[in-house]
Amino acid sequence: MLPKLCHDWAMGTFFEPHRYDLHTHSTISDGTTSPSEIVQEAARIGLAGISLTDHDTTDGWAEAREASAAAQIEFLPGIEITTTHEMRSIHLLAYGPNEAYEPLQDKLDYLRGARKKRAAEMIQRLRKDFHLNWDDLIVQADINRVQSLGRPHLADALVRGGFFRDRSHAFEDALSPSGPYYVPTATLSTVEAITLVRAAGGFPVLAHPAAFRMRRPVAVEAIEDLATVGLGGVEIYHPENRDDWITPIKERAEALGLVVTGSSDFHGEGKPNRLGEYTTPEEVFTDIRGRVATPN
Ligand code: AMP
Ligand code: ZN
Ligand code: FE
Ligand code: FE
């Protein structure tokens, strides 16, 4: 077993201090809690800091930053960028890029636009078998804040319609990539995204490279290739990484001198992942923060 942070939910306290959760999603993308609620929960359970990494948007940063100052925990701005490398979906975490760097914002705009179009296309397909329309997607309480639409929003609409018990059941059934309703969303190439993040002064980290939902882990050769174009780290400790798949990746990442991170990929109530379930130690956090254009 990979080391999991020991904590006691009943007590609400961590046994290990100075830990950071560097991968979280809010209602700005497909989480169910606001940026400030994530920060407040992080402070409550004793985390030293978090990164907010909503999909393809920097919109939640300002709120999370302000809430972190109030809660007296550290904040590192982040994004999870939708990319593809050699026909394989890759999620790229980008820490601390300059938010004002227009080439990056232009690409994020493009990705969010593509997500909206794709959600509309999936609704068209789902309508054949489920009573669902665009408005069902928009009734969610915080929907006006959503910048980045994804399958979780379709899942929530299906749950509200009474078709599935929860998000996870909708994902396994109607929203599965192998099902008839699935439409892929447009992506950036991973190499292009890494280059862009570096140009923006950010630090790119490969998210969950051994997630069990994938048919196979990201190949170690691909990680080597991405390291040569500027990949800075790999998210080794993640609730969805399979132990047997992640072990060779961890060895190679360390041999390549890449930074190793751990995070929960918290999505509020939308996913079983719990905030602080996996974490990154202070020295790694400080290392990443020291290498970026926007460290807080
Ligand atoms: P999409 O990027 O739109 O294809 O949707 C995939 C995203 O849904 C990933 O970022 C997942 O982390 C997220 N997600 C949220 N809740 C769930 C869930 N219950 N099961 C699977 N994926 C989920
Ligand atoms: Zn997500
Ligand atoms: Fe992801
Ligand atoms: Fe994520």
Image (tube, rainbow, N blue to C red):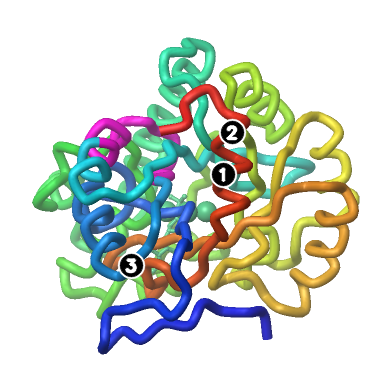
In which quadrant of the rendered view does residue 43 lie? bottom left
Which region of the structure is painted magenta? 52-65
Figure quadrant, ligand 1: bottom left
Where residue 60 appears, as percent x and y from the top left, is 29, 37
Nearest the viewer among 284 and 23 is: 284
Circles 2 and 1: CB distance less than 8 Å? yes
Circles 2 and 3: CB distance less than 8 Å? no
**In this image, 159 relative to 189: left or right?**
left
Where residue 55 appears, as percent x and y from the top left, is 43, 42
- Residue indicated by mark 3: 46
Q: CA distance from mark 2 to mark 3?
A: 23 Å
Q: Residue at x 41, y 71 (%)?
A: 273
Q: Look at the image and say whether residue 62 sits in the magenta stretch.
A: yes
Q: Is mark 2 within 8 Å of ligand 4?
A: no
Q: Quadrant of the N terminus?
A: bottom right
Label 1 SS: helix
Q: CA distance from mark 3 to mark 1?
A: 18 Å
The amino acid at mark 1 is Thr
- Label 1 CA crowd tier, 10 Å (few <14, some 14–19, many 20+): few
Nearest the viewer among 109 and 72 is: 72
The amino acid at mark 2 is Gly
Where residue 64 appears, as percent x and y from the top left, is 27, 41
- As drawn, the label of residue 259 is none
Label 2 SS: loop
Q: Residue at x 56, y 79 (%)?
A: 4
The amino acid at mark 3 is Gly
Q: Quadrant of the C terminus?
A: top left
Q: Is residue 127 visible?
A: no
Q: Look at the image and say whether residue 283 sits in the magenta stretch.
A: no
- Residue indicated by mark 2: 290
Q: Is 10 rendered above or below residue 172?
A: below
